[in-house]
Image (cartoon, helix red, strand yellow):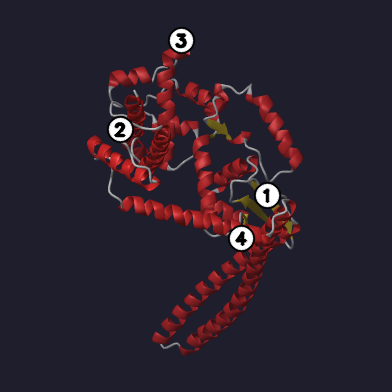
Amino acid sequence: MNSKRMTVKDFILSEVPDWDDEVVASARFKAFSGQRSDWQSKFLFWRDLIIKIARHVGLFIIRPSEVKNDWFNRGGLTPLCLDHVLFLMYNEGDITRTADLVDPTSGRLSQLFRKVSNLITRSTTTQEIISEEPFILTMLLKDKAAEVIKLLSESHWNSSCIVTMKKFQEVCGGPDEKSAILGYLGGCGKAQYISVRKKELVEGIKISLSTSALSHISNLDYDILHLIWTTERLQQQLDMIDQRYELSRQSALTSLHSGKRKLALRYARELKLATQSREKCSSLLNRVEEVLRVIADAESTKKVSEAVELGARAMKENKISAEEVDVCLRDIQESIDSQKEVEKALERSPAYTDLDEEDIEEEFKRLELAVGNETGVPEPENAFTDREGKETSEAAEFINDAFSNLKLSDDLAESKLEKESKIPEMEAA
């Protein structure tokens, strides 16, 4: 505890440089008085500091006595406002009492009764109750639950998994942490307690590893739980056999070095028996694991077949054939390829943003003359006929499209069109 206290103290000094300032500390440690606006900043200071320290030490279940007497103890002085801070954090949802969490291991009727009871007793919760009972930091509980799901996802490929209660407790970090995380996940609909009784009671948890809630529990889930529990028991037996084998081996070597041949032979027989036991246990473990693999593969195949069936049903309902879908996909791919080729060509082409307006004007005239020559009508120097004015208007539209394709600025293109539209008007005049 002393090492933890020093760690917390050093962390507080790094987060609050003026922690040892007597004047500032005296103001912070006072009880709240007056309107909330008068002490709101102090409340936020203590709330944020409690969350930061808990995250630093890796805890999300905290006892108020530890916060007062360990974290914020300054030479025997503790914050007088701390009970009030915890009470406000409870009312605002920053902390939760362990008694408020629903126990998924109980029956549905019991869970419903607990929820109703919590709604009734929450309004009567006082500062004294909050200051005595362990509390859970809601934000850190959510983070820890997400971490547990991530760890389980690394060893499971499906959208849900089943683990024994012992394994779940190991992943969570302890019995209290297990109860809190299980209560939270159960309240979110992402975890459900299951148990099966063969020769003894086997308890486990089915957990959703995706964002969706769990579906119903099937009879297969109970069988899977029993198989997983069996693999864990067999693995424990293998570990015990390996330990016994190593002890017998060391004893046999010691006996040989001491010249005790008969004793060494006895240990050699134990080694032989341990080897035979390990082979039998390992063979059984492999068979059970193979069954679990077959079940997992069957579930994956079932999901794939369900997806194919849903896709076929949707195509049938919308009167779409497989050939039409294939043609559509090919068209989309061709459009994507064409777009990529255009983008590459534009990247290789020189930039037009640095061209002068006079250069563009000259290029515009040359293009206009070329269009006039293609029409086969000579262009008069000083006058335009109605037909020629129409051709000039068509040429302007053609050139406007050309400039748009070259990605010239809109303002520049508009200015050129305005100039060309004014030419026939001036010459007609």
CB atoms of marks 3 and 2 within 8 Å: no
Q: Which mark identifies residue 326?
A: 4
Residue at the farthest top position: 34
Q: Earlier in the sequence, mark 3 or mark 2?
A: 2
Residue 224 position (above or below residue 120): below
Please state if 38 lies on the left or on the right of 363 as rendered. right
Mark before the other along the chain sequence, 1 or 2: 2
Q: Which of the two marks, 3 or 4, is nearer to us in this view? A: 4
What residue is disc 1 on? Answer: 193
Image quadrant occupied by the C terminus: top left
Asked whether the residues under the numbered discs 3 and 4 touch, taking CB atoms below 8 Å apart as contact, a structural biologist would say no
The quadrant where residue 145 appears: top right
Give the alpha-carbon distance from disc 1 to disc 2, as whole Å: 44 Å
For the question of whether residue 258 can be seen, the reply is: no
Q: Secondary structure at mark 2?
A: helix
- Residue 166 drawn at (x, y percent): 59, 55
Q: Secondary structure at mark 4?
A: helix
Q: Earlier in the sequence, mark 2 or mark 4?
A: 2
**Horizontally, is 52 left or right of 176 in the view?**
left
Quarter of the picture containing the N terminus is top left
Mark 1 neighbour class, 10 Å CA radius: few under 14, some 14 to 19, many 20 or more = many
As rendered, which of 198 and 419 lies closer to the eye?
419
For the residue labelled by badge 1, is the local secondary structure a helix, a strand or a loop? strand
Q: Position of residue 189 (x, y in %)?
A: 65, 43
Name which of mark 1 and mark 4 comes first in the sequence: 1
According to the picture, the residue beneath numbered tag 2 turns out to be 13
Q: Say which amino acid is labelled 2.
A: Leu
Asked whether the viewer can see residue 67, the reply is yes
Query: Which residue is depicted at the point 44% across and 43% down?
Result: 58
The residue carrying mark 3 is: 34
Measure how far apart labels 2 and 4 are at the Cα level. Answer: 66 Å
The residue sitting at 54% across, 25% down in the picture is: 92
